[in-house]
Amino acid sequence: MLEKKATTEVPINDVMARRWSGRAYDPGRPVEPEKLLACMEAARWSLSCFGAQPWQYVVCDRARDQAAWDAALDCLVEGNRAWAQNAPVLILSVASENFKHNGQPNRWAQHDTGAASISLCLQATDLGLMAHQMGGFDAGKAREVFSVPEEHTPMAMIAIGYQLLQREMPEELHAKEFAPRHRNPVGDHFFSGKWNNSWMTESTGAENV
Ligand SMILES: Cc1cc2nc3c(=O)[nH]c(=O)nc-3n(C[C@H](O)[C@H](O)[C@H](O)COP(=O)(O)O)c2cc1C
């Protein structure tokens, strides 16, 4: 398995370090239903404002419903379709924009849906699967083909499946699959007590490189 473990200042949870957005899926290896269910459970037990659980997922498992999977694939932009066509499962995440308990706008709906989605992806990683979220899809088309109601916003497509063996990875995917992963330094995003005051220089004396 091609691993692209995060390089971190200090050790972090292994599943978080190992999760990455691969594109080389094995089209011949479906996802076991119990593993898919485990991914759903992980999202289900995510946290949310007021416990509202403002997420919905349209799960398109090629092994279960080829037509739905075809429709999901058809929503993707060309660049994503090129590799996601080998992912046996495509999932549309949707945020419910209003609270059910009072009908008021839920301004945390998309935040909470994203949180549920990363739980789903981390569970997938833990089960030896790859999960890759995509914003590159036609949200209007997805709304139409999956009958997503008003006041619900299609957020992302998530490809799930097993990674291809390294020796089978097609040439055109090599550059992206083997490219190193990068992140901004911790101090660019974590401030100490006030805006733009890098946590790293303030609290540890360490300079980011
Ligand atoms: C909301 C969202 C939308 C994304 N859209 C795309 C996409 O359309 N196509 C793609 O190849 N990757 C997409 N990605 C994956 C990111 O490019 C990837 O997460 C980022 O480069 C970090 O790489 P890593 O996930 O391997 O750590 C998306 C990720 C997120 C969270």
Image: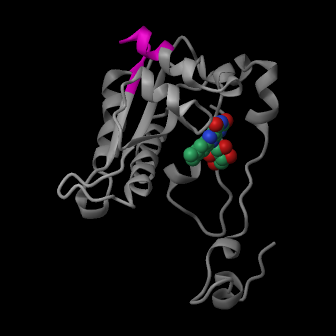
Residue located at (54% from left, 62% from top): 12
Task: Name the quarter where the C terminus is drawn.
Answer: bottom right
Q: Does 69 lie within the magenta span?
A: yes
Question: In the image, residue 124 lies at what x, y percent?
Answer: 45, 37
Question: In the image, residue 17 lies at what x, y percent?
Answer: 57, 53
Residue located at (40% from left, 49% from top): 113
In the rendered view, does 124 fall on the left or right side of 34? Answer: right
Give the mark count.
0
In the rendered view, does 80 fall on the left or right side of 102? Answer: right
**Most foreground residue, 18 or 185:** 185
Query: How is colour applied across the structure in the image?
Result: one colour
Figure check: 35 above or below 198: above
Kindly give the residue lying farthest to the left in the view shown.
101
Question: In the image, residue 23 lies at what x, y percent?
Answer: 65, 29
Report the span colored magenta.
59-70
Residue 47 in view in this figure: yes
Question: In the image, residue 121 lies at what x, y percent?
Answer: 47, 42
Residue located at (82% from left, 33% from top): 175
Q: Does 58 lie within the magenta span?
A: no
**Most foreground residue, 43 or 147:** 147
Figure check: 116 above or below 69: below
Residue 159 in view in this figure: no
Task: Name the quarter where the N terminus is drawn.
Answer: top right
Ligand 1 occupies quarter = top right
Figure check: 58 above or below 114: above
Figure check: 103 above or below 80: below
